[in-house]
Image (cartoon, rainbow, N blue to C red):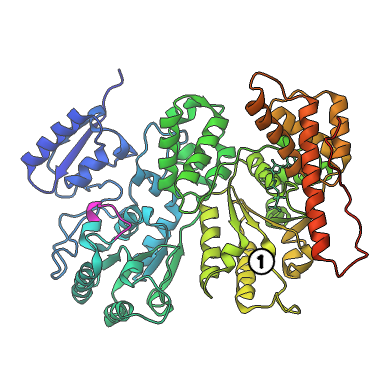
Amino acid sequence: MARRATVRVVPLGDRQAFADRIAEAEHDGRTTLGDLLREGPALALQPLDGLAGTPVVSLSVELADPGPDEPLYRPPGMVVGGTAADAGPPADPGPPVEQRPMEGARPAAGHPEVIDEATTVRIAYDEQIRQTAEYLAADLSVLVRCEKLLVEHLALEMAGRSGHHVKVIPAESAGGKPSGVLPGGGAGRRQQILTELQVAVRHCGKRDVLVVAHLDLLAGGSDAALGAEARELIDVLYERSKVVLLAFVDPSLVIPEVLANRFAVRVDIDILPREVLAETGEAIPIGTALVTREEAERFEGFQPVQFYKHIAGLNAVRLRHAMIYAGHVHPRGVFQDLLDELRKFKARTTASSFEVPHVTLDDIGGYAEVRKELLRALALLNEPERIPKKFRSELLPKGFIFYGPPGTGKTLFAKAVATAMNATILVVSGPEVTDMYVGESERKVREIFAEARRNAPAIIVFDEIDSIASRRSGREDGGSRAGNAIVAQLLTEMDGFRPEVQVLIIGTTNRLDIIDEALLRPSRFRAVAIGLPDRDARREIAAVHARHFEVTVPGVVLDRLAVVTKDMNGDEIRSIFRDARVDQLLTSPDGDVGPDRLGTVVGRLRQGRHQRDLNREQGASDHPEADPPATGTDDDVVL
Ligand code: ATP
């Protein structure tokens, strides 16, 4: 067995209590050295060299006394010094602490053995953490826009590395309490935190940085006319503009601009980087740095580079959650299994109903031209590395509009594309988006896109996109104010696409003629016609559904079916097999679905159409010379 590394530590509090804590950690087997030191709190007498994530049980931890000039080292994420809990003048800075860059910001060159959330965040966002810490060290206030799951870890890292004395508001956020909501809750609690903040601002010293973990929630979370909470917060933060602040807001929440202006610098933490620098100085894929060796081995053929596009939009903590989920539900498998599980994880953990599609291009009959066009797009989407970097955002397709009569498989094609991209898919009904209050629709569109980015690769399908994106002017029905704003929002979102995060928009419509031209520019949506199927396509569609409903159909019968289903769409052809299957199950459960039964159903279907045509004709009797209906029979069709 390898010799255990010895780590000498200096507790900042009760020595005996800390010795007991070491014994406990050795016993539970899970507590890492980082946890032990942070909880202690305690400092190490040597650089931690990546040991912070190692369980205490695999180390030899000894209590020691520091010599007068010996530097002390702390684990990543540890704050040394008071929090605003004391709300008094700047606390005693405590023992001298080396303010060098913290240990372990760079990962080893291969997969780590173990990795905790704090380390994940530190590795993934090392660059932004370093930059932010530098701004803070230069006494510049920083506003960080990132998802709430990251706040706790980022706050401690950024402020901790600044070299300033750190105070956290609310105080309990510093202790690793779950972030995301204001602890406690309610207006009373908000008031309490505001007071805490006010006291801290008044007492803040020159080398202090004040961390506001959830600025958005304190502000009342609205960009509308300034509410009372926002006003109060503005008063507090502007009271002493010299105080160095580090505040966090969630990208889905908006804060008043005047509040944001209090900060000299804004930092966005959105997508994961493709690569990070290892301690050796070489760039390694994020799929190597943030995935443990065991996880990579669990999914045979794991490809760290390919992996990136499936996780680019996740934040680092959510990536770790996704990996743990995948390993839990799929203890052994191949790389594709991991991708499938990641998709399921994303679909399950979103507010909107993103789904994992099950349709493949093989489930769609006919339409060779459409298929060819989509395969070309997929070749680029699935291997963006084929495109030189500088052209990527221009050459990657952003959207399609599938247009044609109902029931021809437009939604089906969208789902098949999603499957081929390993993407999640969200089908949004156009009218649902437009039937909202002014302003609400744009917010909805913004949210849908944000969620799609977080779950990339993703496809958003806008069914009946004509209801959203009808022409902005020149038509009585298409120029409404709300409609304009939604189109504008849609365009903004599409223009802001980043090639790393694959989001494809597919609109479906029966009315291409009323779609806003701005959307039909080649760089935005490409229009693809999906009309009624021709004879060959009808034969193929029939074959697909015969297979699906397990009906054996000889080739000659398929030929006949293709003829007698003239003018029918894919949905109707499917219904022939479905209805014949139902008839057979009800009348002769042990029998087969033979050509006779199919013929009866086709006859019924054509009769129904005939009747509908007649009714329509009667309704339109002021047009006596209307064309006679195309099909019409009362008989079964002989196949
Ligand atoms: P709408 O415009 O009414 O939304 P759509 O064109 O999106 O219709 P889909 O919902 O994709 O039509 O198709 C409905 C059903 O019809 C599908 O679930 C599928 O079973 C069947 N279908 C349509 N076209 C095809 C096809 N080309 N191949 C196989 N099945 C098809």
Quadrant assignment for the N terminus: top left
User: Mark 1 = which residue?
Assistant: 467
Residue 495 on image: x %, y % = 64, 64
Relative to 83, 638 lies left or right = right
Q: Residue at x 51, y 52 (%)?
A: 454
The vertical placement of 56 against 311, above or below, is above
Residue 615 on image: x %, y % = 79, 58
Q: Which residues are magenta?
A: 174-181
The answer to whether residue 375 is seen in the rendering is no
Does the magenta run of residues contain 53? Answer: no
Could you tell me the amino acid type at mark 1? Answer: Ser
Q: Residue at x 57, y 33 (%)?
A: 303
Residue 127 on image: x %, y % = 45, 54
Predominant secondary structure in magenta? loop
Q: Nearer the viewer, residue 457 or 541?
A: 541
Quadrant assignment for the C terminus: top right
Kindly state the secondary structure of the residue where label 1 is placed. Answer: helix
